[in-house]
Amino acid sequence: RKEVEQDPGPFNVPEGATVAFNCTYSNSASQSFFWYRQDCRKEPKLLMSVYSSGNEDGRFTAQLNRASQYISLLIRDSKLSDSATYLCVGSSGGSYIPTFGRGTSLIVHP
Amino acid sequence: NAGVTQTPKFQVLKTGQSMTLQCAQDMNHEYMSWYRQDPGMGLRLIHYSVGAGITDQGEVPNGYNVSRSTTEDFPLRLLLAAPSQTSVYFCASGLAGVNTGELFFGEGSRLTVL
């Protein structure tokens, strides 16, 4: 079982919709969390860090729930350009080596 | 801004051949790593380094060697290529420690082993 689990999707939503992804982690000592975006046949790019107090960047909101060991990403007012795979990352406590989830595919259609 | 540069972008090998994937970063990052990405498997860590002269194995190290003689460079060597090593390889760099998850990736190297 991977340390970081994601629903692979795809999540198929219309433009303008609000969509949320969850990512669960098994290592309770994990300290840092991040969301990445990966476009088809491209490299992953950091989307945002996930802080204990939550983090908002425009239409994107990331939350951390330590009690239930999951992080979430909320995308409001979805755009066609949001279509991509979203990867969640947790760093294992102590060594801080990041562990990637397998990604959640989002398709935004007109 | 160069960031993380990987070469080559594409490579075709025959079984048993060896080759080196190059990775260089110009951000003075302590942490560098190599991942392979296969359909349905996500990113899997091959080797990583937390500084010059220090390397360690990741999740799938067999068949690969690395070295870190300088802060900037982190080459990945395939010793005896096998079809199972057909994949997309990404090099990534970042700060070590709590922020290690904030990584910058190269554009990837697509390797096919026949």
Image: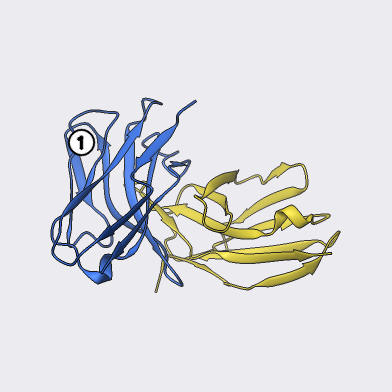
Give the residue number, with chain letter if any, for mark 1.
B68
Residue A35: image location, x then y, percent: 57, 51
Q: Which hue belongs to chain A?
A: yellow
Is A21 or B68 nearer to us in this picture?
Answer: B68
Residue A71: image location, x then y, percent: 59, 58
Look at the picture and state if B99 lies above or below A30: above
Q: Within the image, what quadrant is residue B27 found in? A: top left
Residue A12: image location, x then y, percent: 73, 71
Is residue A4 found left or right of B63 in the rendered image? right
| Secondary element at tag 1 | loop
Q: Which hue belongs to chain B?
A: blue
Residue B83: image location, x then y, percent: 25, 70
Q: Can residue B62 be seen in this view?
A: yes
State the residue at coordinates (17%, 40%).
Answer: B67
Q: Residues within 10 Å of mark 1 (few under 14, many from 20)?
A: some
Is residue A41 found left or right of B74 in the rendered image? right
State the residue at coordinates (70%, 66%).
Answer: A107
Q: Within the image, what quadrant is residue A19 found in? A: bottom right
What's the amino acid at mark 1?
Answer: Arg
Look at the picture and state if B109 lies above or below B52: below
